[in-house]
Image (tube, helix red, strand yellow):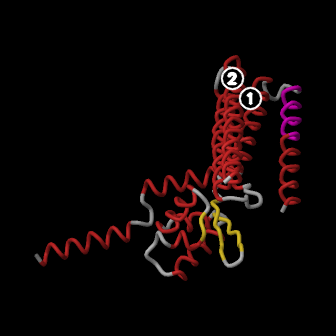
Amino acid sequence: MIIKRLGFAIGLAALFLLAAAGLRYAAGSGMLAEETATRVIMALTGLGLAAYANIMPKQLGRARRSPAAEARAQSALRFGGWALTLAGLAYAFLWGFAPLSIARAAAMTVLGAATLATMTYAIWSFTLCREAGDASASR
Amino acid sequence: MNGVFKALSDPTRRKVLELLRKRPMTAGELGEHFPVSKPTMSAHYAVLREANLIDGVKQGTTITYRIKLSVLEEALLGFTRALGIGTGGANAEESAASTSEGRIS
């Protein structure tokens, strides 16, 4: 399973690199505008992020000690999955259609905000789990 | 993807997923929410597991189910619930029953 997932990730990364190289070559030889090549590469990156974040809630791992911890972990995965999927789609959309000056700043802001929200939610969930664990252990 | 649509088309299986969204539950805990037999529920769990929408962890004689929905699958679940897909038959039966009752009275 891990090898299959790793193979898929490496394949996808290779595909991205090939696409980027191809688009750069096309832009360099005048077949494609430099701006178009940049937009396509960045939009592909956003879509790749969305595709990966989409399956994030499915990566449950081994079962946790308590049902409460399991529920919190699942909730954090779901929150992160949704936040990063939407951010990836927004990133792709912005790079695809917004003026370049806006796309650069807005895409990074959206992605940064989603990452920050995901990390904050994960840390908050982890803290709640630890507190619940400590409380049950002291009883 | 066909398996996912098949799994989400049934209201009972959708309710199972709704319950598992709150927290992981054992087969017994889930069964308490439905007025159907254990074998029927087991068949529903099997369909959901086959579609990779839930995950079962066996501890002794108990199986604890965990939800395993991707973002897209969760969005599909929301859509099918909002559109009431799969409840048409039940509604039709209910409306047919109420119509026949109206005729009798």
Residue A118: x, y in percent? 69, 38
In the image, is residue B31 above or below residue A88?
A: below
Q: Earlier in the sequence, mark 1 or mark 2?
A: 1
Other residues around mark 2 within 10 Å, as few (<14) / some (14–19) / many (≥20): some
Q: Is residue B80 left or right of residue A63?
A: left
Q: Would you name the residue on which mark 1 appears? A: A39
Q: Amino acid at mark 2?
A: Ala
The residue lying furthest to the left in this view is: B105
Q: Residue at x 78, y 33 (%)?
A: A41
| Quarter of the figure with the C terminus of chain A | bottom right
Residue B58: x, y in percent? 71, 73
Q: Say if the magenta span includes residue B55.
A: no
In the image, is residue A99 above or below residue B97?
A: above
Q: Residue at x 77, y 58 (%)?
A: A61
The residue lying furthest to the top in this view is: A101
Q: Would you name the residue on which mark 2 appears? A: A103
Chain letter behind tag 1: A
Per the model, the C-alpha gap separating discs 1 and 2 is: 9 Å
Quick one: A38 or A101, which is closer to the camera? Answer: A101
Tell me the chief SS of the magenta region: helix
Q: Amino acid at mark 1?
A: Arg
For the record, the magenta segment spans A17-28
Quick one: A105 or A117, which is closer to the camera? Answer: A117
Callout 2 secondary element: helix
Chain letter behind tag 2: A
| Quarter of the figure with the N terminus of chain A | bottom right
